[in-house]
């Protein structure tokens, strides 16, 4: 993988129009940032060709704060320091899916269904990466909890809803832990729509909210608060069904900083089948699909994560 892309391709004899269209759209989706992969939060992993799904990635740490020394006439030269380089390998799994279009649907549609299908396949591949990262956050132990004196998911009960104070606590914890914000200068607060609804009903939030720039709505951002960009993940938020007290669903909103995860989409192969063949002698169905290795791992360099998550309840 080169540059800041998330994937590499290995294609032969593919449709000359559809394949570049899908690749371009996947790149656009990933660079724009889906809910769980906001721009700047993912370190791309490079797929190792010829391997069984191995990815490699490198992250570079900052110099330790306060390491400067005095350089007056009698003072010695400073010690030579080493750069902190974190080299990570992780293994992905091979996945794929195929979309079919019948001849009747294409002939009777006023649209170019192959182009529409290409867009849908590209989004599916992009969301696949986003879901891998989402699963990594979902498996992490929450750092803060709704309600009073709670410190475990199974202690969350009805009424332990998300509040503006809890979001401020998450941002403060991120800053205290030296988690860098994204390039925008903000952290990404990602949550499902019910958690965000509870936040929006908080009086402090109502008084202090900064509404998002209209252009940011394209990436799902609905506002800014306490140093965080609020991103609505819709139904793709993290929810642990029945995990709380009395089988209450526990929601896990997450505050994401820079370089929080390593992820990769490698050896992406886009396959198209158009027209008649032995399996489809009348050419009644065209297909378009992909297969790829995909994987990811949390960035825990120096045993510190680059995100903060919460455990809360909510209700309709």
Image: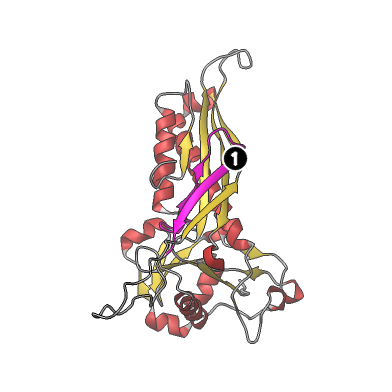
At mark 1, the secondary structure is loop
User: Residue 263, how many percent across, how many down?
Assistant: 52, 50
Tell me if mark 1 has few (under 14), some (14-19) or many (20+) residues whose alpha carbon lies within 10 angstroms of its own. Answer: many
Q: Is residue 181 visible?
A: yes
Which residue does the image show at 41% across and 56% down from the upper left? 39
Residue marked by disc 1: 53
Residue 200 highlighted magenta (yes or no): no
Does 160 sit above or below residue 219?
below
Residue 50 highlighted magenta (yes or no): yes
Q: How many marks?
A: 1
Q: Is residue 110 visible?
A: no
User: Residue 9, how many percent across, how many down?
Assistant: 47, 33
Does 136 sit above or below residue 113?
below
Give the extent of the magenta segment.
36-61
Front in this rendered view, residue 140 or 55:
55
Does 263 sit above or below residue 165?
above
User: Residue 136, how many percent across, how many down?
Assistant: 60, 58
Which residue does the image show at 49% across and 50% down from the upper left? 57
Q: Quadrant of the C terminus?
A: bottom right
């Amino acid at each position: 993988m080169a540059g800041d892309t998330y994937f590499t391709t290995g294609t032969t004899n593919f449709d000359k129009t559809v394949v570049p269209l899908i690749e371009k759209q996947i790149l656009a989706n990933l660079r724009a940032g889906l809910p769980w992969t906001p721009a700047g939060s993912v370190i791309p992993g490079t797929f190792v060709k010829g391997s069984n799904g191995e990815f490699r990635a490198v992250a570079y740490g900052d110099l330790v704060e306060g390491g400067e020394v005095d350089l007056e006439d009698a003072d010695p030269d400073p010690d030579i320091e080493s750069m902190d380089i974190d080299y990570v390998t992780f293994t992905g799994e091979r996945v794929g899916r195929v979309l079919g279009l019948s001849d009747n649907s294409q002939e009777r549609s006023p649209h170019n269904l192959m182009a529409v299908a290409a867009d849908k396949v590209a989004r599916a591949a992009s969301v696949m990466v986003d879901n891998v990262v989402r699963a990594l956050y979902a498996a992490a132990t929450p750092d803060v909890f709704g309600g009073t004196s709670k410190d475990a998911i199974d202690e969350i009960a009805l009424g332990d809803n998300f509040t503006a104070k809890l979001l401020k606590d998450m941002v403060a914890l991120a800053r205290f832990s030296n988690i860098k914000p994204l390039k925008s200068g903000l952290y990404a607060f990602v949550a499902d729509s019910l958690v965000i609804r509870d936040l929006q009903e908080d009086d402090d939030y109502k008084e202090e909210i900064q509404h998002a720039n209209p252009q940011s709505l394209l990436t799902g951002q609905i506002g800014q608060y306490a140093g965080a960009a609020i991103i609505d993940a819709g139904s793709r938020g993290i929810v642990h069904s029945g995990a709380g007290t009395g089988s209450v669903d526990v929601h896990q909103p997450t505050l994401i900083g820079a370089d929080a995860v390593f992820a990769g989409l490698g050896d992406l192969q886009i396959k198209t089948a158009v027209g008649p063949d032995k399996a489809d002698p009348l050419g009644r169905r065209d297909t378009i699909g992909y297969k790829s290795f995909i994987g990811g791992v949390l960035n825990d360099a120096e045993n510190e994560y680059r995100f903060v998550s919460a455990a809360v309840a909510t209700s309709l």
